[in-house]
Image (tube, helix red, strand yellow):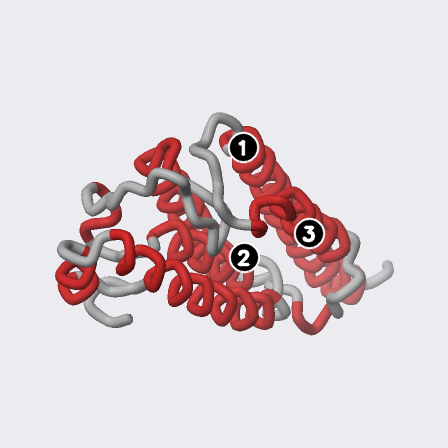
Amino acid sequence: MPNPSPAGTRAGPQRRSMGEVSTVHVVDIVIFVCWAAFWLYWVAAAFGNKASQSRWTRFAAFRIAIFVVILVLVRANVFRGNHAVVSNPWLQGVGMAVFFAGLALAVWARVYLGRNWGMPMTQRAEPELVTAGPYRRVRHPIYSGLLLAVIGTAIAVSVYWLVATVLIGAYFIYSATVEERFMASQFPGTYPEYKRSTKMLIPFIL
């Protein structure tokens, strides 16, 4: 009578491996679809904003298109090797939670700004200083939310997204610095105090 133990030994790891691949695939698709839906909402919400005095908004759709292309390439595994894919279910769960928290923060801040919102380094014709809602804790909660979402993507999908986190973080800090110079010139009596009382991106830290 044949010994079933070798076959059983081989089948167990194979089933686990297929389960891990399936989980990775599902998490990857969910995050990709959510990113795509988020940017579609972002583009649609841009209509009806206040007039802009900056040339940056003319290229808003182009910059978002670049981000979407990067998402598609990542989804197609162009930048990813098997060694960098996250398969730990706990890390996937934590990453998904961080990802959705980041998107929620960005959307909350965007809705709170209303027609005052603009692309990075955009100067509105009739700016308003918003200091309530998420802006009570940080001066640029949209940037904070997007960075949090990218970090969540790195935790849940692939460590290669950490490279995007560094690049996007540097861009956001530069954008925030440019925007704050403009706000300080527009609100010399109130913005300096607001800047002293709140952090740029991370409450109580940065």
Q: Nearer the viewer, residue 178 or 108?
A: 178
Looking at the image, is 182 positioned above or below residue 160? above
| Mark nearer the viewer, 3 or 2 | 3
Amino acid type, mark 3: Leu
Q: Residue at x 48, y 62 (%)?
A: 151
Q: In the figure, is residue 192 to the left or right of 180?
A: left
Q: Earlier in the sequence, mark 3 or mark 1?
A: 1
Q: In this figure, which residue is indicated by the disc labeled 3?
A: 71
Residue 109 sits in quarter: top left
Q: Earlier in the sequence, mark 1 or mark 2?
A: 1
Q: In this figure, which residue is indicated by the disc labeled 2?
A: 153
Determine crowd level at label 3: few under 14, some 14-19, many 20+ residues with C-alpha closer than 10 A: some
Q: Is residue 106 visible?
A: yes
Distance CA(mark 3)–CA(mark 1): 16 Å
Q: In this figure, which residue is indicated by the disc labeled 1?
A: 41
Q: Residue at x 41, y 64 (%)?
A: 178
Secondary element at tag 2? helix
